[in-house]
Image (cartoon, rainbow, N blue to C red):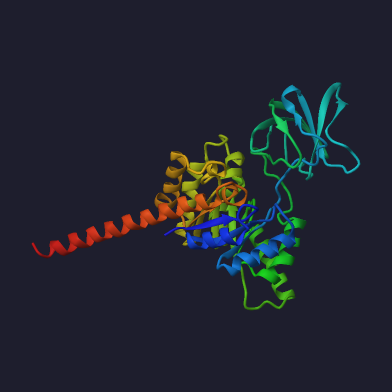
Amino acid sequence: MAKIITTIGPSSESSEVLKYFVDHNVEYARFNTSHNSIQWHIKTMLKARKFGLQILLDLAGPKVRLGNLSTPINLEGCAKVILEKESETKKYPFFTKFSNANYLVLPIRHNIFDSIKNSDSVLIDDGKVELEVENSYENFCTCYVQQGGLVSSGKSINFPDSDINIDFLTSRDKEFLQAIIPIVHPEVISASFIQNPEQIDTLNRYIIKILQDNQLYDYEPKICSKIEKSSALKNQNLNRIVAKSDFVMVARGDLALETKPLHLMVPFYQETIKNVTHAKHKKLIIATQILESMVLSKTPTRAEISDLYRAIVSNQAEYVMLSAESATGKNPKEAVKVISDLLSHYKKLQIKANSLESSKFFLSFRH
């Protein structure tokens, strides 16, 4: 029977909510290191553990984002954009002349320009804004605006046509691992944007070094690989990634933006990932927008309940994971209760079905 993973944040860090989670089929508290300080994470992890929750440390990973903008800007009226490696000496956004045309210059936090090519798609803020690469250079690229919209500091950037070459373990990831492992001993460490099995080896080596440096010989965390890049699904990568993992997460948010046709491939890949994960006897986590409407609403949509049913009953996922619903949403307890109630109802139906089968079996001997 499936269990629940809840992301912990301002809406769920109180003792009252943590206790409610424990009482309603929540097994893991997920901590997303994209947000908050190391100190906050350690303090809240230890608090969650006191209530009996296990800890899933979710590393931010090499997520490409816009840099700092002095003000949000609407790209609706911009024909052309330059993306460049962020410079601390420049104030963004600004306009510049290049190749006899006016360009709006936006910063990004990684130098990824050797990984992108002409005509590649660039999706900003979960695909709300779309650019197309015109030309790529050593430290910047020029782009056409295909679909405009408002952009602001730190918004996510996806490159569905590109295999982006960035160091797998970021400096922030390493800082969190070094600080949290010796104190908290998280049961699971989750790696974001896994592209190949060699990256899991890299993570394992780094964890082992921390364990040795701190003389932690009786503790070893389990590894969760988040499948959210198209490269993780290519060739034999998925099979080899799953083989080296303890948990496999279908991270549907970025997966929808990293595979084409955009937004359409997730249900197909979810089925594939489920099959490979269970064939290798690993644990499956279904994540992203499980009950997204409940960030604001006290009741889920019918489509969300159907999606939840598919994850639990059809996909036989060991875990379903709440993100914003439990971390920053208005109804963290209500969201957990919806899943807990569905699990309870499914369990009753299973017991009833098993009882009927047993009765049929018994009656067959009487005839």
Question: Relative to the observer, which residue lies in front, 326 or 20?
Answer: 20
| Left or right of 299 on screen, residue 114 | right
The quarter of the picture where residue 204 lies is bottom right
Q: Residue at x 73, y 75 (%)?
A: 214
Farthest residue, direction left: 367
Number of disc labels: 0
Location of residue 48 by image quarter: bottom right
Q: Looking at the image, which residue sits at the far right?
A: 89
- Residue at 68% over, 31% down: 129
Of residues 68 and 166, the one drawn nearer to the viewer in this rendering: 68
Q: Which corner quadrant holds the C terminus?
A: bottom left
In front here: 69 or 331?
Answer: 331
Residue 77: x and y in percent read: 75, 22
- Identify which residue, 136 or 345, lies in the foreground: 345
Q: Is residue 14 visible?
A: yes
Residue 35: percent from left, percent from top:
70, 52
Note whether 24 is above or below 259 in the view shown: below
Residue 291 point in image, percent of width and height: 51, 45
Q: Residue 310: where, in percent of width, then height?
A: 42, 47
In the rendered view, would you say 97 is above or below 123? above
Indicate the quadrant containing the N terminus: top left, top right, bottom left or bottom right: bottom left
Q: Is 354 on the left or on the right of 241, as rendered? A: left
Q: Is residue 208 visible?
A: no
